[in-house]
């Protein structure tokens, strides 16, 4: 069975992280902190950039575009090699929303992202099911969110006027 795209996104980030630890001692050992580090800071030379580019090609069959070395974070770098983290996460949330209420099936992803999270995930059980799904797909350094996991996640989704896209941003903040 193929790996879930969200899990695959994080697996790629973890492999890049492991490789970066061999290239630059300033690579933060914490995956979430590494994801926020700048590629241009950790890869200041063409030689280091080519090394990571070759690694990505060998490991993932992915060509790294030159622009990927100019992005703000390694999360953004990873996004340049695959569908973005936000897009994949929105797909997961949309799938759970459709299971709860089929009316979301007719929406585009962009329109779904503008929906209020509290209205889409309107019961504690639906939010709990979503939490359980994400908990199996996202590494513990990124998820559960700060605080008492299910309760903090529940609060994240029920914050007044928070859209789905804003909730996704809050998950990875």
Image (cartoon, rainbow, N blue to C red):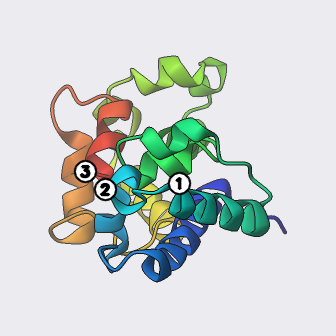
Q: Image point 54% across, 36% down: which residue?
A: 67
Query: Is residue 13 depicted above or below 123 in this figure?
Result: below
Whether residue 85 is visible to the viewer of this picture, yes or no, is no
In the displayed structure image, the side of residue 70 where residue 162 appears, left or right: left
Q: How many marks?
A: 3
In front: label 3 or label 2: 2
What kind of element bears circle 1?
helix
Q: Residue furthest right?
A: 1
Position of the N terminus by quadrant: bottom right
Please rate how many residues cluster around mark 1, counting C-alpha atoms within 10 Å: few if below 14, some from 14 to 19, many from 20.
Answer: few
Whether residue 43 is visible to the viewer of this picture, yes or no, is yes
In front: label 2 or label 1: 1
What kind of element bears circle 2?
helix
CA separation, marks 2 and 1? 21 Å
Between 94 and 100, the one lying in front of the other is 94
Mark 3 or mark 1, earlier in chain: 1
Q: Image point 42% across, 40% down: which residue?
A: 71
In the displayed structure image, the side of residue 40 where residue 80 appears, left or right: right
Please provide percent x and percent y for residue 61. Answer: 80, 58
Which residue is denoted by mark 1 in the rendering? 46
In the displayed structure image, the side of residue 3 where residue 25 appears, left or right: left
Q: Which mark is residue 36?
A: 2
In front: label 3 or label 1: 1
CA separation, marks 3 and 1? 30 Å
Which residue is denoted by mark 3 in the rendering? 173
Please provide percent x and percent y for residue 23. Answer: 47, 76
Please provide percent x and percent y for residue 154. Answer: 25, 54
């Amino acid at each position: 069975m193929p790996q879930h795209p969200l899990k695959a996104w994080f697996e790629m980030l973890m492999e890049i992280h492991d490789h970066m630890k061999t290239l630059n001692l300033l690579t933060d050992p914490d995956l979430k902190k590494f994801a926020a580090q700048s590629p241009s800071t950790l890869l200041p030379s063409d030689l280091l950039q080519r090394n990571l580019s070759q690694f990505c090609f060998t490991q993932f069959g992915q060509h790294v575009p030159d622009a990927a070395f100019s992005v703000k974070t390694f999360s953004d770098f990873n996004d340049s090699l695959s569908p973005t983290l936000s897009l994949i996460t929105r797909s997961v949330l949309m799938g759970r929303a459709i299971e709860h209420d089929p009316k979301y099936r007719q929406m585009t992803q962009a329109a779904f992202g503008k929906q209020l999270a509290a209205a889409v995930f309107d019961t504690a059980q639906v939010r709990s099911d979503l939490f359980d799904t994400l908990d199996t797909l996202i590494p513990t350094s990124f998820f559960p969110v700060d605080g008492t996991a299910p309760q903090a996640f529940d609060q994240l989704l029920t914050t007044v006027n928070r859209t789905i896209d804003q909730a996704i941003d809050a998950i990875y903040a």
